[in-house]
Image (cartoon, grey):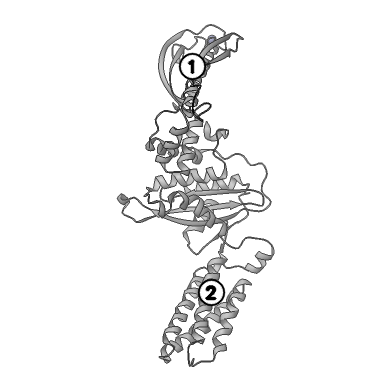
């Protein structure tokens, strides 16, 4: 079977033109291998792309013929060759330049009517797709996927990496869309850190990537950045807050574990307008350790003390902390510490169990003391339906950090590379990265 594919092009002027695009010789006796194959499809698309591009270039060039002010013809200055990288192949183009009209300032200079369209030597769609695949898969894998399904030019892992870097920069440099509606409630920020492997030349084993989520009642937005490489983490976070309609006045709620650097990033972005809340899950885990250690202690054979003196405060600790009675919880803990310390010195039979319980109590005590200002009435917040833990940010650690840069992937990262991937991945997961998003594409 012989198949001829013909395109009919109708120009803006109404002139029609027919052109043979491709000729396919398909065997009539193929064994279960019916229809078009991938290679045919790729070849067809590549040819179609060339025909369409040539026509578009011609129309844009023709449209620039007359001066928009006086209507005089602007003569052709010269022709230049340009290549345009597209999803459907790299196309060499012959592009004209025209002389500027004498009715305007700067006469005599040549200009190209296609300068804007060919500025990056590649189409926005290709760039966005390269960045998206690079954020989802390894750069090599992304290059392979593109080459497999599309008649694009040969892809290199370094091309994908550089394109992703450019797109990440565009995301960071993009002006935030003006948000007309100020959110009735200030946003809540869930923030957490991920550790990824660092490349050997940076003399460190690990690199910190900060990830998280900003939520208002009806919107949410993920973010990711490597503080070492970000030009301005504060500006980046501030823009995300603005996009979600933060009024710039009321304090933003930040929920994180005890690491001080994380809420400080948000403090930098909001000029200190932050209410920091310590994540309940991290407190609860430490309380659990105390409870278990005390249980183990009183179960020791021939326990010399009065069990209830130990079990009672350990059991009520969680209740006090949940209801925001920090002072009472602190006093309870101090009693426990004093009693356990006495036991760990006095009696050889319970020494091990007592010192274990003692270290657990100290651990919780110092954790609470270091984060005194960030403890709230968790019970009340919970009953009002307000968030009390960073569980949602921990999802981001997996989605943004570990899935692409986790330790199991055996890749090593430079701070800038990790930053670019974190920024782009957050945008990809939010669905913000698309060609229709003109701010990024332009
Ligand atoms: Zn003119």
Separation of residues labelled 1 and 2 (CA atoms): 73 Å
In front here: 28 or 354? 28
Q: Residue at x 58, y 33 (%)?
A: 436
Q: Residue at x 43, y 53 (%)?
A: 406
The crowd level at tag 2 (other Cα within 10 Å; few <14, some 14-19, many 20+) is some
In front here: 1 or 368? 1
Give the residue number, with chain letter if any, for mark 2.
288
Q: Tell me if 74 is positioned left or right of 187 in this view.
A: left
- Secondary element under disc 2, as helix, strand or loop, is helix
Residue 1 lies, with reference to residue 251, above or below; the image says above
Residue 149 lies, with reference to residue 44, above or below; the image says below
Percent position (x, y) of residue 127? 47, 33
Q: Tell me if 164 is positioned left or right of 272 in this view.
A: left
Give the residue number, with chain letter if any, for mark 1.
23
Percent position (x, y) of residue 192? 50, 57
Quarter holding ligand 1? top right
């Amino acid at each position: 079977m012989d198949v001829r594919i013909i395109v009919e092009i109708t120009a803006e002027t109404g002139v029609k033109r027919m052109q043979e695009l491709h000729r396919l010789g398909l065997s009539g006796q193929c064994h279960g291998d019916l229809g078009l194959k991938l290679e045919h499809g790729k070849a067809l698309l590549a040819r179609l792309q060339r025909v369409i591009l040539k026509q578009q270039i011609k129309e844009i060039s023709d449209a620039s013929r007359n001066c928009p002010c006086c209507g005089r013809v602007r003569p052709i200055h010269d022709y230049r060759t340009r290549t345009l990288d597209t999803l459907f192949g790299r196309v060499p183009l012959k592009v004209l330049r025209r002389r500027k009209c004498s009715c305007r300032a700067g006469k005599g200079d040549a200009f190209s009517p296609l300068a804007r369209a060919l500025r990056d030597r590649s189409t926005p769609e290709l760039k966005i797709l390269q960045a998206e695949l690079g954020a989802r898969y390894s750069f090599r894998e992304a290059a392979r996927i593109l080459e497999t399904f599309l008649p694009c030019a040969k892809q290199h892992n370094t091309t994908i990496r550089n394109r992703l870097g450019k797109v990440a920069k565009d995301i960071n440099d993009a002006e935030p869309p003006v948000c007309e509606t100020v959110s009735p409630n200030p946003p809540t920020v869930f923030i957490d850190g991920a550790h990824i492997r660092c490349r050997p030349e940076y003399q460190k084993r690990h690199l910190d990537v900060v990830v998280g989520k900003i939520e208002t009642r009806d919107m949410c937005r993920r973010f990711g950045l490597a503080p070492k490489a970000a030009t301005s983490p504060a500006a980046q976070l501030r823009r995300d807050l603005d996009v979600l309609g933060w009024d710039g006045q009321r304090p933003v709620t930040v929920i994180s574990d005890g690491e001080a650097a994380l809420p400080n990033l948000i403090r930098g972005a909001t000029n200190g307008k932050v209410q920091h809340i310590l994540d309940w899950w991290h407190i609860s885990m430490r309380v659990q350790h105390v409870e278990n250690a005390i249980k183990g202690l009183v179960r020791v054979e021939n326990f010399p003390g009065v069990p209830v003196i130990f079990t009672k405060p350990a059991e009520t600790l969680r209740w006090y902390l949940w209801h925001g009675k920090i002072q009472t919880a602190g006093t309870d803990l101090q009693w426990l510490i004093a009693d356990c310390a006495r036991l760990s010195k006095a009696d050889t039979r319970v020494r091990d169990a007592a010192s274990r319980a003692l270290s657990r109590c100290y651990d919780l005590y110092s954790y609470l003391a270091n984060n005194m200002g960030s403890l709230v009435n968790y019970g009340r917040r919970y009953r009002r339906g307000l968030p009390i833990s960073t569980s949602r940010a921990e999802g981001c650690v997996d989605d943004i950090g570990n899935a692409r840069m986790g330790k199991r992937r055996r890749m090593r990262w430079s701070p800038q590379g990790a930053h670019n991937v974190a920024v782009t991945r957050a945008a990809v997961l939010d669905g913000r990265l698309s060609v229709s998003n003109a701010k990024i594409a332009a």
